[in-house]
Image (cartoon, helix red, strand yellow):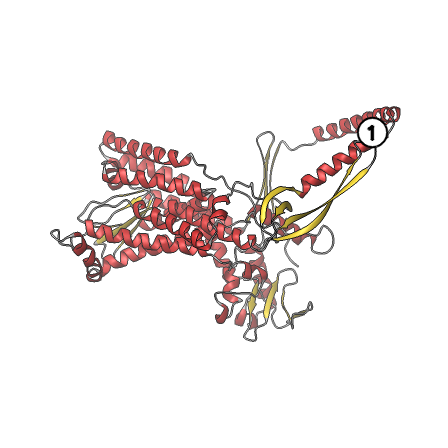
């Protein structure tokens, strides 16, 4: 994990190392282990470095895991009104939730074999490239250019989300005053209101005319300044719509904000500076971006797949660190943003952590948080009785059959993301762990037993790694401790909570995302098996009706009607086809800015 300036140590995607000569070589294992706390206390710089490494890793995993939250399959999108007031806002909210609803490409079970093979191939290839070049400077320049380019999107995402985080604190949507009144900041009406005594009536405060929260809302600004503050809030919060169409190649529509654009500009500048300088700080920033985005976009899909992938890399890490020269050589020769590097104040000691020690366990820990999210809504699901009717005319007579079944009704989904600023301004100190000012704030504090267990397991495994590094004075494969520490504690949590079955069946491949599923239950109300979706029953009912209608009508009438309908449909289809063929965009690039609020 750390190394002093007189010793050569290793880092790579999935290992970290530390060397110190403070422990006497003639001590026994247990004597060395017992002396570790004393050594750390006597070397405050070393202790500070290791604390920064552990804290950075935990913070990166914590933030990335929350950034990877999306609608779980145990919840459904809330229904939106089609008409009436606020239709535009409802459409925007629905589009935002649909974007949040997208499933990412997940891993499959065979990746448990492919990951170690690919990692070993890359590692051995780099080793022989270093031997072939003789001087690693040329290879470092190539890798720096490659990672500068590849990390551009990751860094832009990381910086943009960081700006969104700060924007939430500067311009929250709700805040609470000292009397307990929850104020809502309305950009449309450019004012602030609160609801008194849990009634539906909104009381607008004429004294609070700016978009600022708390005591800042009482500040008196000129009309021009107040208008400028609202426009700044609008600029940072509202989304722009970008459309890109190239006929036969791409047809995409996506949304961006000013923070996304600003984040991309900052990312380009940081990459250019990193390529032209040897800044450790910029290298770490690129490393943060790669770790953050990797954890968000990578999904183990299931706990079985995630556990298998981690244990596959577990054995790979042990072999490459202890039994081959590849890891140490590549780690000490390559200078690229695939590690986090920290130095003491006098730069006498250096501590390093490979990004893989964050990303590999991090994607499994993020899966635990999403499983917590899934279970939160799963416990809110209800079974409701429903009478299903089907008309059958296949025998020549219309027969209506009725069957009573139970359907699983999923709760409406509430997006918990982007609530850090609201939580800061709209939560009393007594409710800091359970804010309830708004439904979104309440939804953001769902129980997280698996996530917390995994984080504790990661922390203890990192401490164990540090202890072994100091004891043996040799580079240690971090996953030797991190994999059992994280995976074992998660499965033990499921065993203690009696939710092993739910863990085993949980998947993020989209197969669980069904609405109003008809199920069969036992005498105690427990679900035995899934019968079908309600939509399937409706389709079956429609087919029965169509079949009866065909048999009850005369053949000649059917032929006549069929002929007329057929000619009419063909004519209409030809006309529609010509219209569509005549009008389609060959190339289109547009940016639609949000309408300024008046």
Towards the viewer: 253 or 84: 84
Which residue, given by chain and number where applicable, does mark 1 sit on?
551
Seen at 59% across and 49% down, the residue is: 97
Left or right of 219? Residue 389 is right
Q: How many marks?
A: 1
Residue 198: which quarter of the image? Answer: bottom right
Q: Quarter of the image containing the C terminus? A: bottom right
In the rendered view, does 518 fall on the left or right side of 116?
Answer: right
Say what secondary structure mark 1 lies in: helix
Q: Position of residue 112 (x, y in %)?
A: 39, 37
User: Residue 516: x and y, percent?
Assistant: 64, 47
Above/below status of 578 relative to 305: above
Residue 240 visible? The answer is no
Q: Is residue 283 left or right of residue 299?
A: left
Q: In this view of the protein, can residue 478 be seen by the observer? A: yes
Classify residue 427 as left or right of residue 575: left
Residue at point 69%, 68% (across, down): 201
Position in image of residue 449 (x %, y %) = 45, 56
In the rendered image, the vertical position of residue 404 relative to residue 324, given as above or below: below
Q: Give residue 271's position: percent from left, percent from top.
A: 39, 44
Foreground pick, 529 / 69:
529
Callout 1 environment at 10 Å: few (<14), some (14 to 19), or many (20+)?
some
Most distant residue in the left direction = 26
Q: Residue furthest bottom?
A: 179
């Amino acid at each position: 994990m750390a190394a002093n300036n007189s010793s050569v140590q290793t880092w790579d995607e999935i290992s970290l190392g530390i060397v110190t000569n403070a422990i006497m070589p003639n001590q026994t294992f247990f004597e060395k282990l017992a002396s570790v706390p004393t050594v750390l206390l006597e070397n405050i710089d070393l202790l500070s470095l290791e604390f920064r490494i552990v804290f950075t890793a935990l913070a990166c995993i914590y933030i990335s895991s929350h950034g990877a939250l999306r609608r779980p399959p145990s919840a459904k999108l809330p229904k939106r009104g089609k008409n009436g007031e606020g239709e535009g806002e409802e459409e925007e909210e629905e589009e935002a939730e649909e974007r949040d609803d997208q499933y990412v490409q997940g891993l499959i079970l065979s990746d448990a074999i492919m990951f170690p093979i690919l990692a070993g191939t890359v590692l051995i290839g780099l080793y022989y490239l270093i031997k072939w070049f003789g001087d690693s400077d040329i290879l470092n320049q190539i890798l720096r250019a490659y990672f500068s380019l590849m990390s551009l999107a990751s860094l832009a995402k990381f910086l943009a989300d960081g700006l969104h985080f700060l924007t939430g604190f500067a311009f929250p949507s709700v805040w609470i005053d000292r009397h307990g009144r929850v104020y809502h900041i309305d950009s449309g009406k450019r004012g602030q209101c609160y609801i008194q005594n849990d009634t539906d009536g909104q009381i607008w405060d004429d004294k609070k005319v700016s978009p600022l929260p708390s005591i800042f809302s009482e500040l008196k600004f000129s009309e021009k300044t107040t208008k400028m503050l609202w426009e700044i809030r609008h600029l940072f919060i509202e989304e722009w719509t970008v459309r890109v169409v190239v006929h036969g190649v791409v047809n995409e529509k996506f949304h961006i904000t000013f923070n996304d654009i600003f984040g991309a500009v900052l990312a380009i500048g940081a990459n250019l500076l990193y390529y032209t300088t040897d800044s450790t700080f910029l290298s770490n920033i690129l490393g943060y971006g790669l770790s953050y985005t990797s954890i968000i976009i990578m999904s183990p899909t299931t706990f079985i797949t995630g556990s298998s992938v981690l244990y596959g890399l577990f054995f790979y890490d042990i072999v490459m660190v202890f039994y081959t020269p590849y890891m140490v050589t590549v780690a000490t020769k390559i200078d690229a943003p695939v590690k986090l590097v920290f130095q003491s104040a006098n730069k006498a000691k250096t501590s390093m952590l490979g990004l893989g020690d964050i990303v590999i366990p991090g994607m499994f820990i993020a899966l635990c948080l999403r499983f917590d999210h899934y279970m939160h809504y799963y416990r809110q699901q209800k079974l409701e009785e429903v009478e299903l009717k089907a008309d059958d005319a296949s025998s020549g007579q219309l027969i209506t059959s009725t069957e009573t079944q139970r359907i699983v009704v999923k709760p409406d989904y509430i997006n918990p993301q982007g609530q850090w600023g609201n939580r800061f301004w709209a939560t009393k100190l007594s409710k800091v762990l359970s804010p309830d000012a708004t439904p979104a704030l309440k939804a953001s504090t769902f129980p997280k037993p698996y996530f917390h267990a995994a984080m504790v397991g990661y922390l203890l495994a990192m401490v164990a790694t540090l202890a072994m590094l100091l004891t043996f004075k040799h580079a240690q494969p971090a996953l030797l401790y991190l994999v059992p520490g994280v995976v074992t504690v998660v499965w033990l949590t499921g065993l203690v909570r009696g939710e092993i079955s739910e863990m085993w069946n949980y998947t993020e491949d989209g197969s669980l995302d069904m609405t109003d599923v008809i199920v069969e239950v036992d005498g105690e109300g427990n679900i035995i098996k899934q019968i079908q979706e309600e939509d399937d029953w409706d389709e079956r009912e429609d087919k029965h009706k169509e079949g009866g209608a065909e048999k009850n009508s005369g053949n000649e009438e059917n032929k006549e009607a069929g002929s007329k309908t057929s000619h009419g449909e063909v004519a209409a289809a030809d006309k529609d086809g010509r219209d569509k063929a005549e009008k389609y965009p060959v190339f289109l690039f547009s940016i639609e800015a949000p309408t300024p609020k008046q």
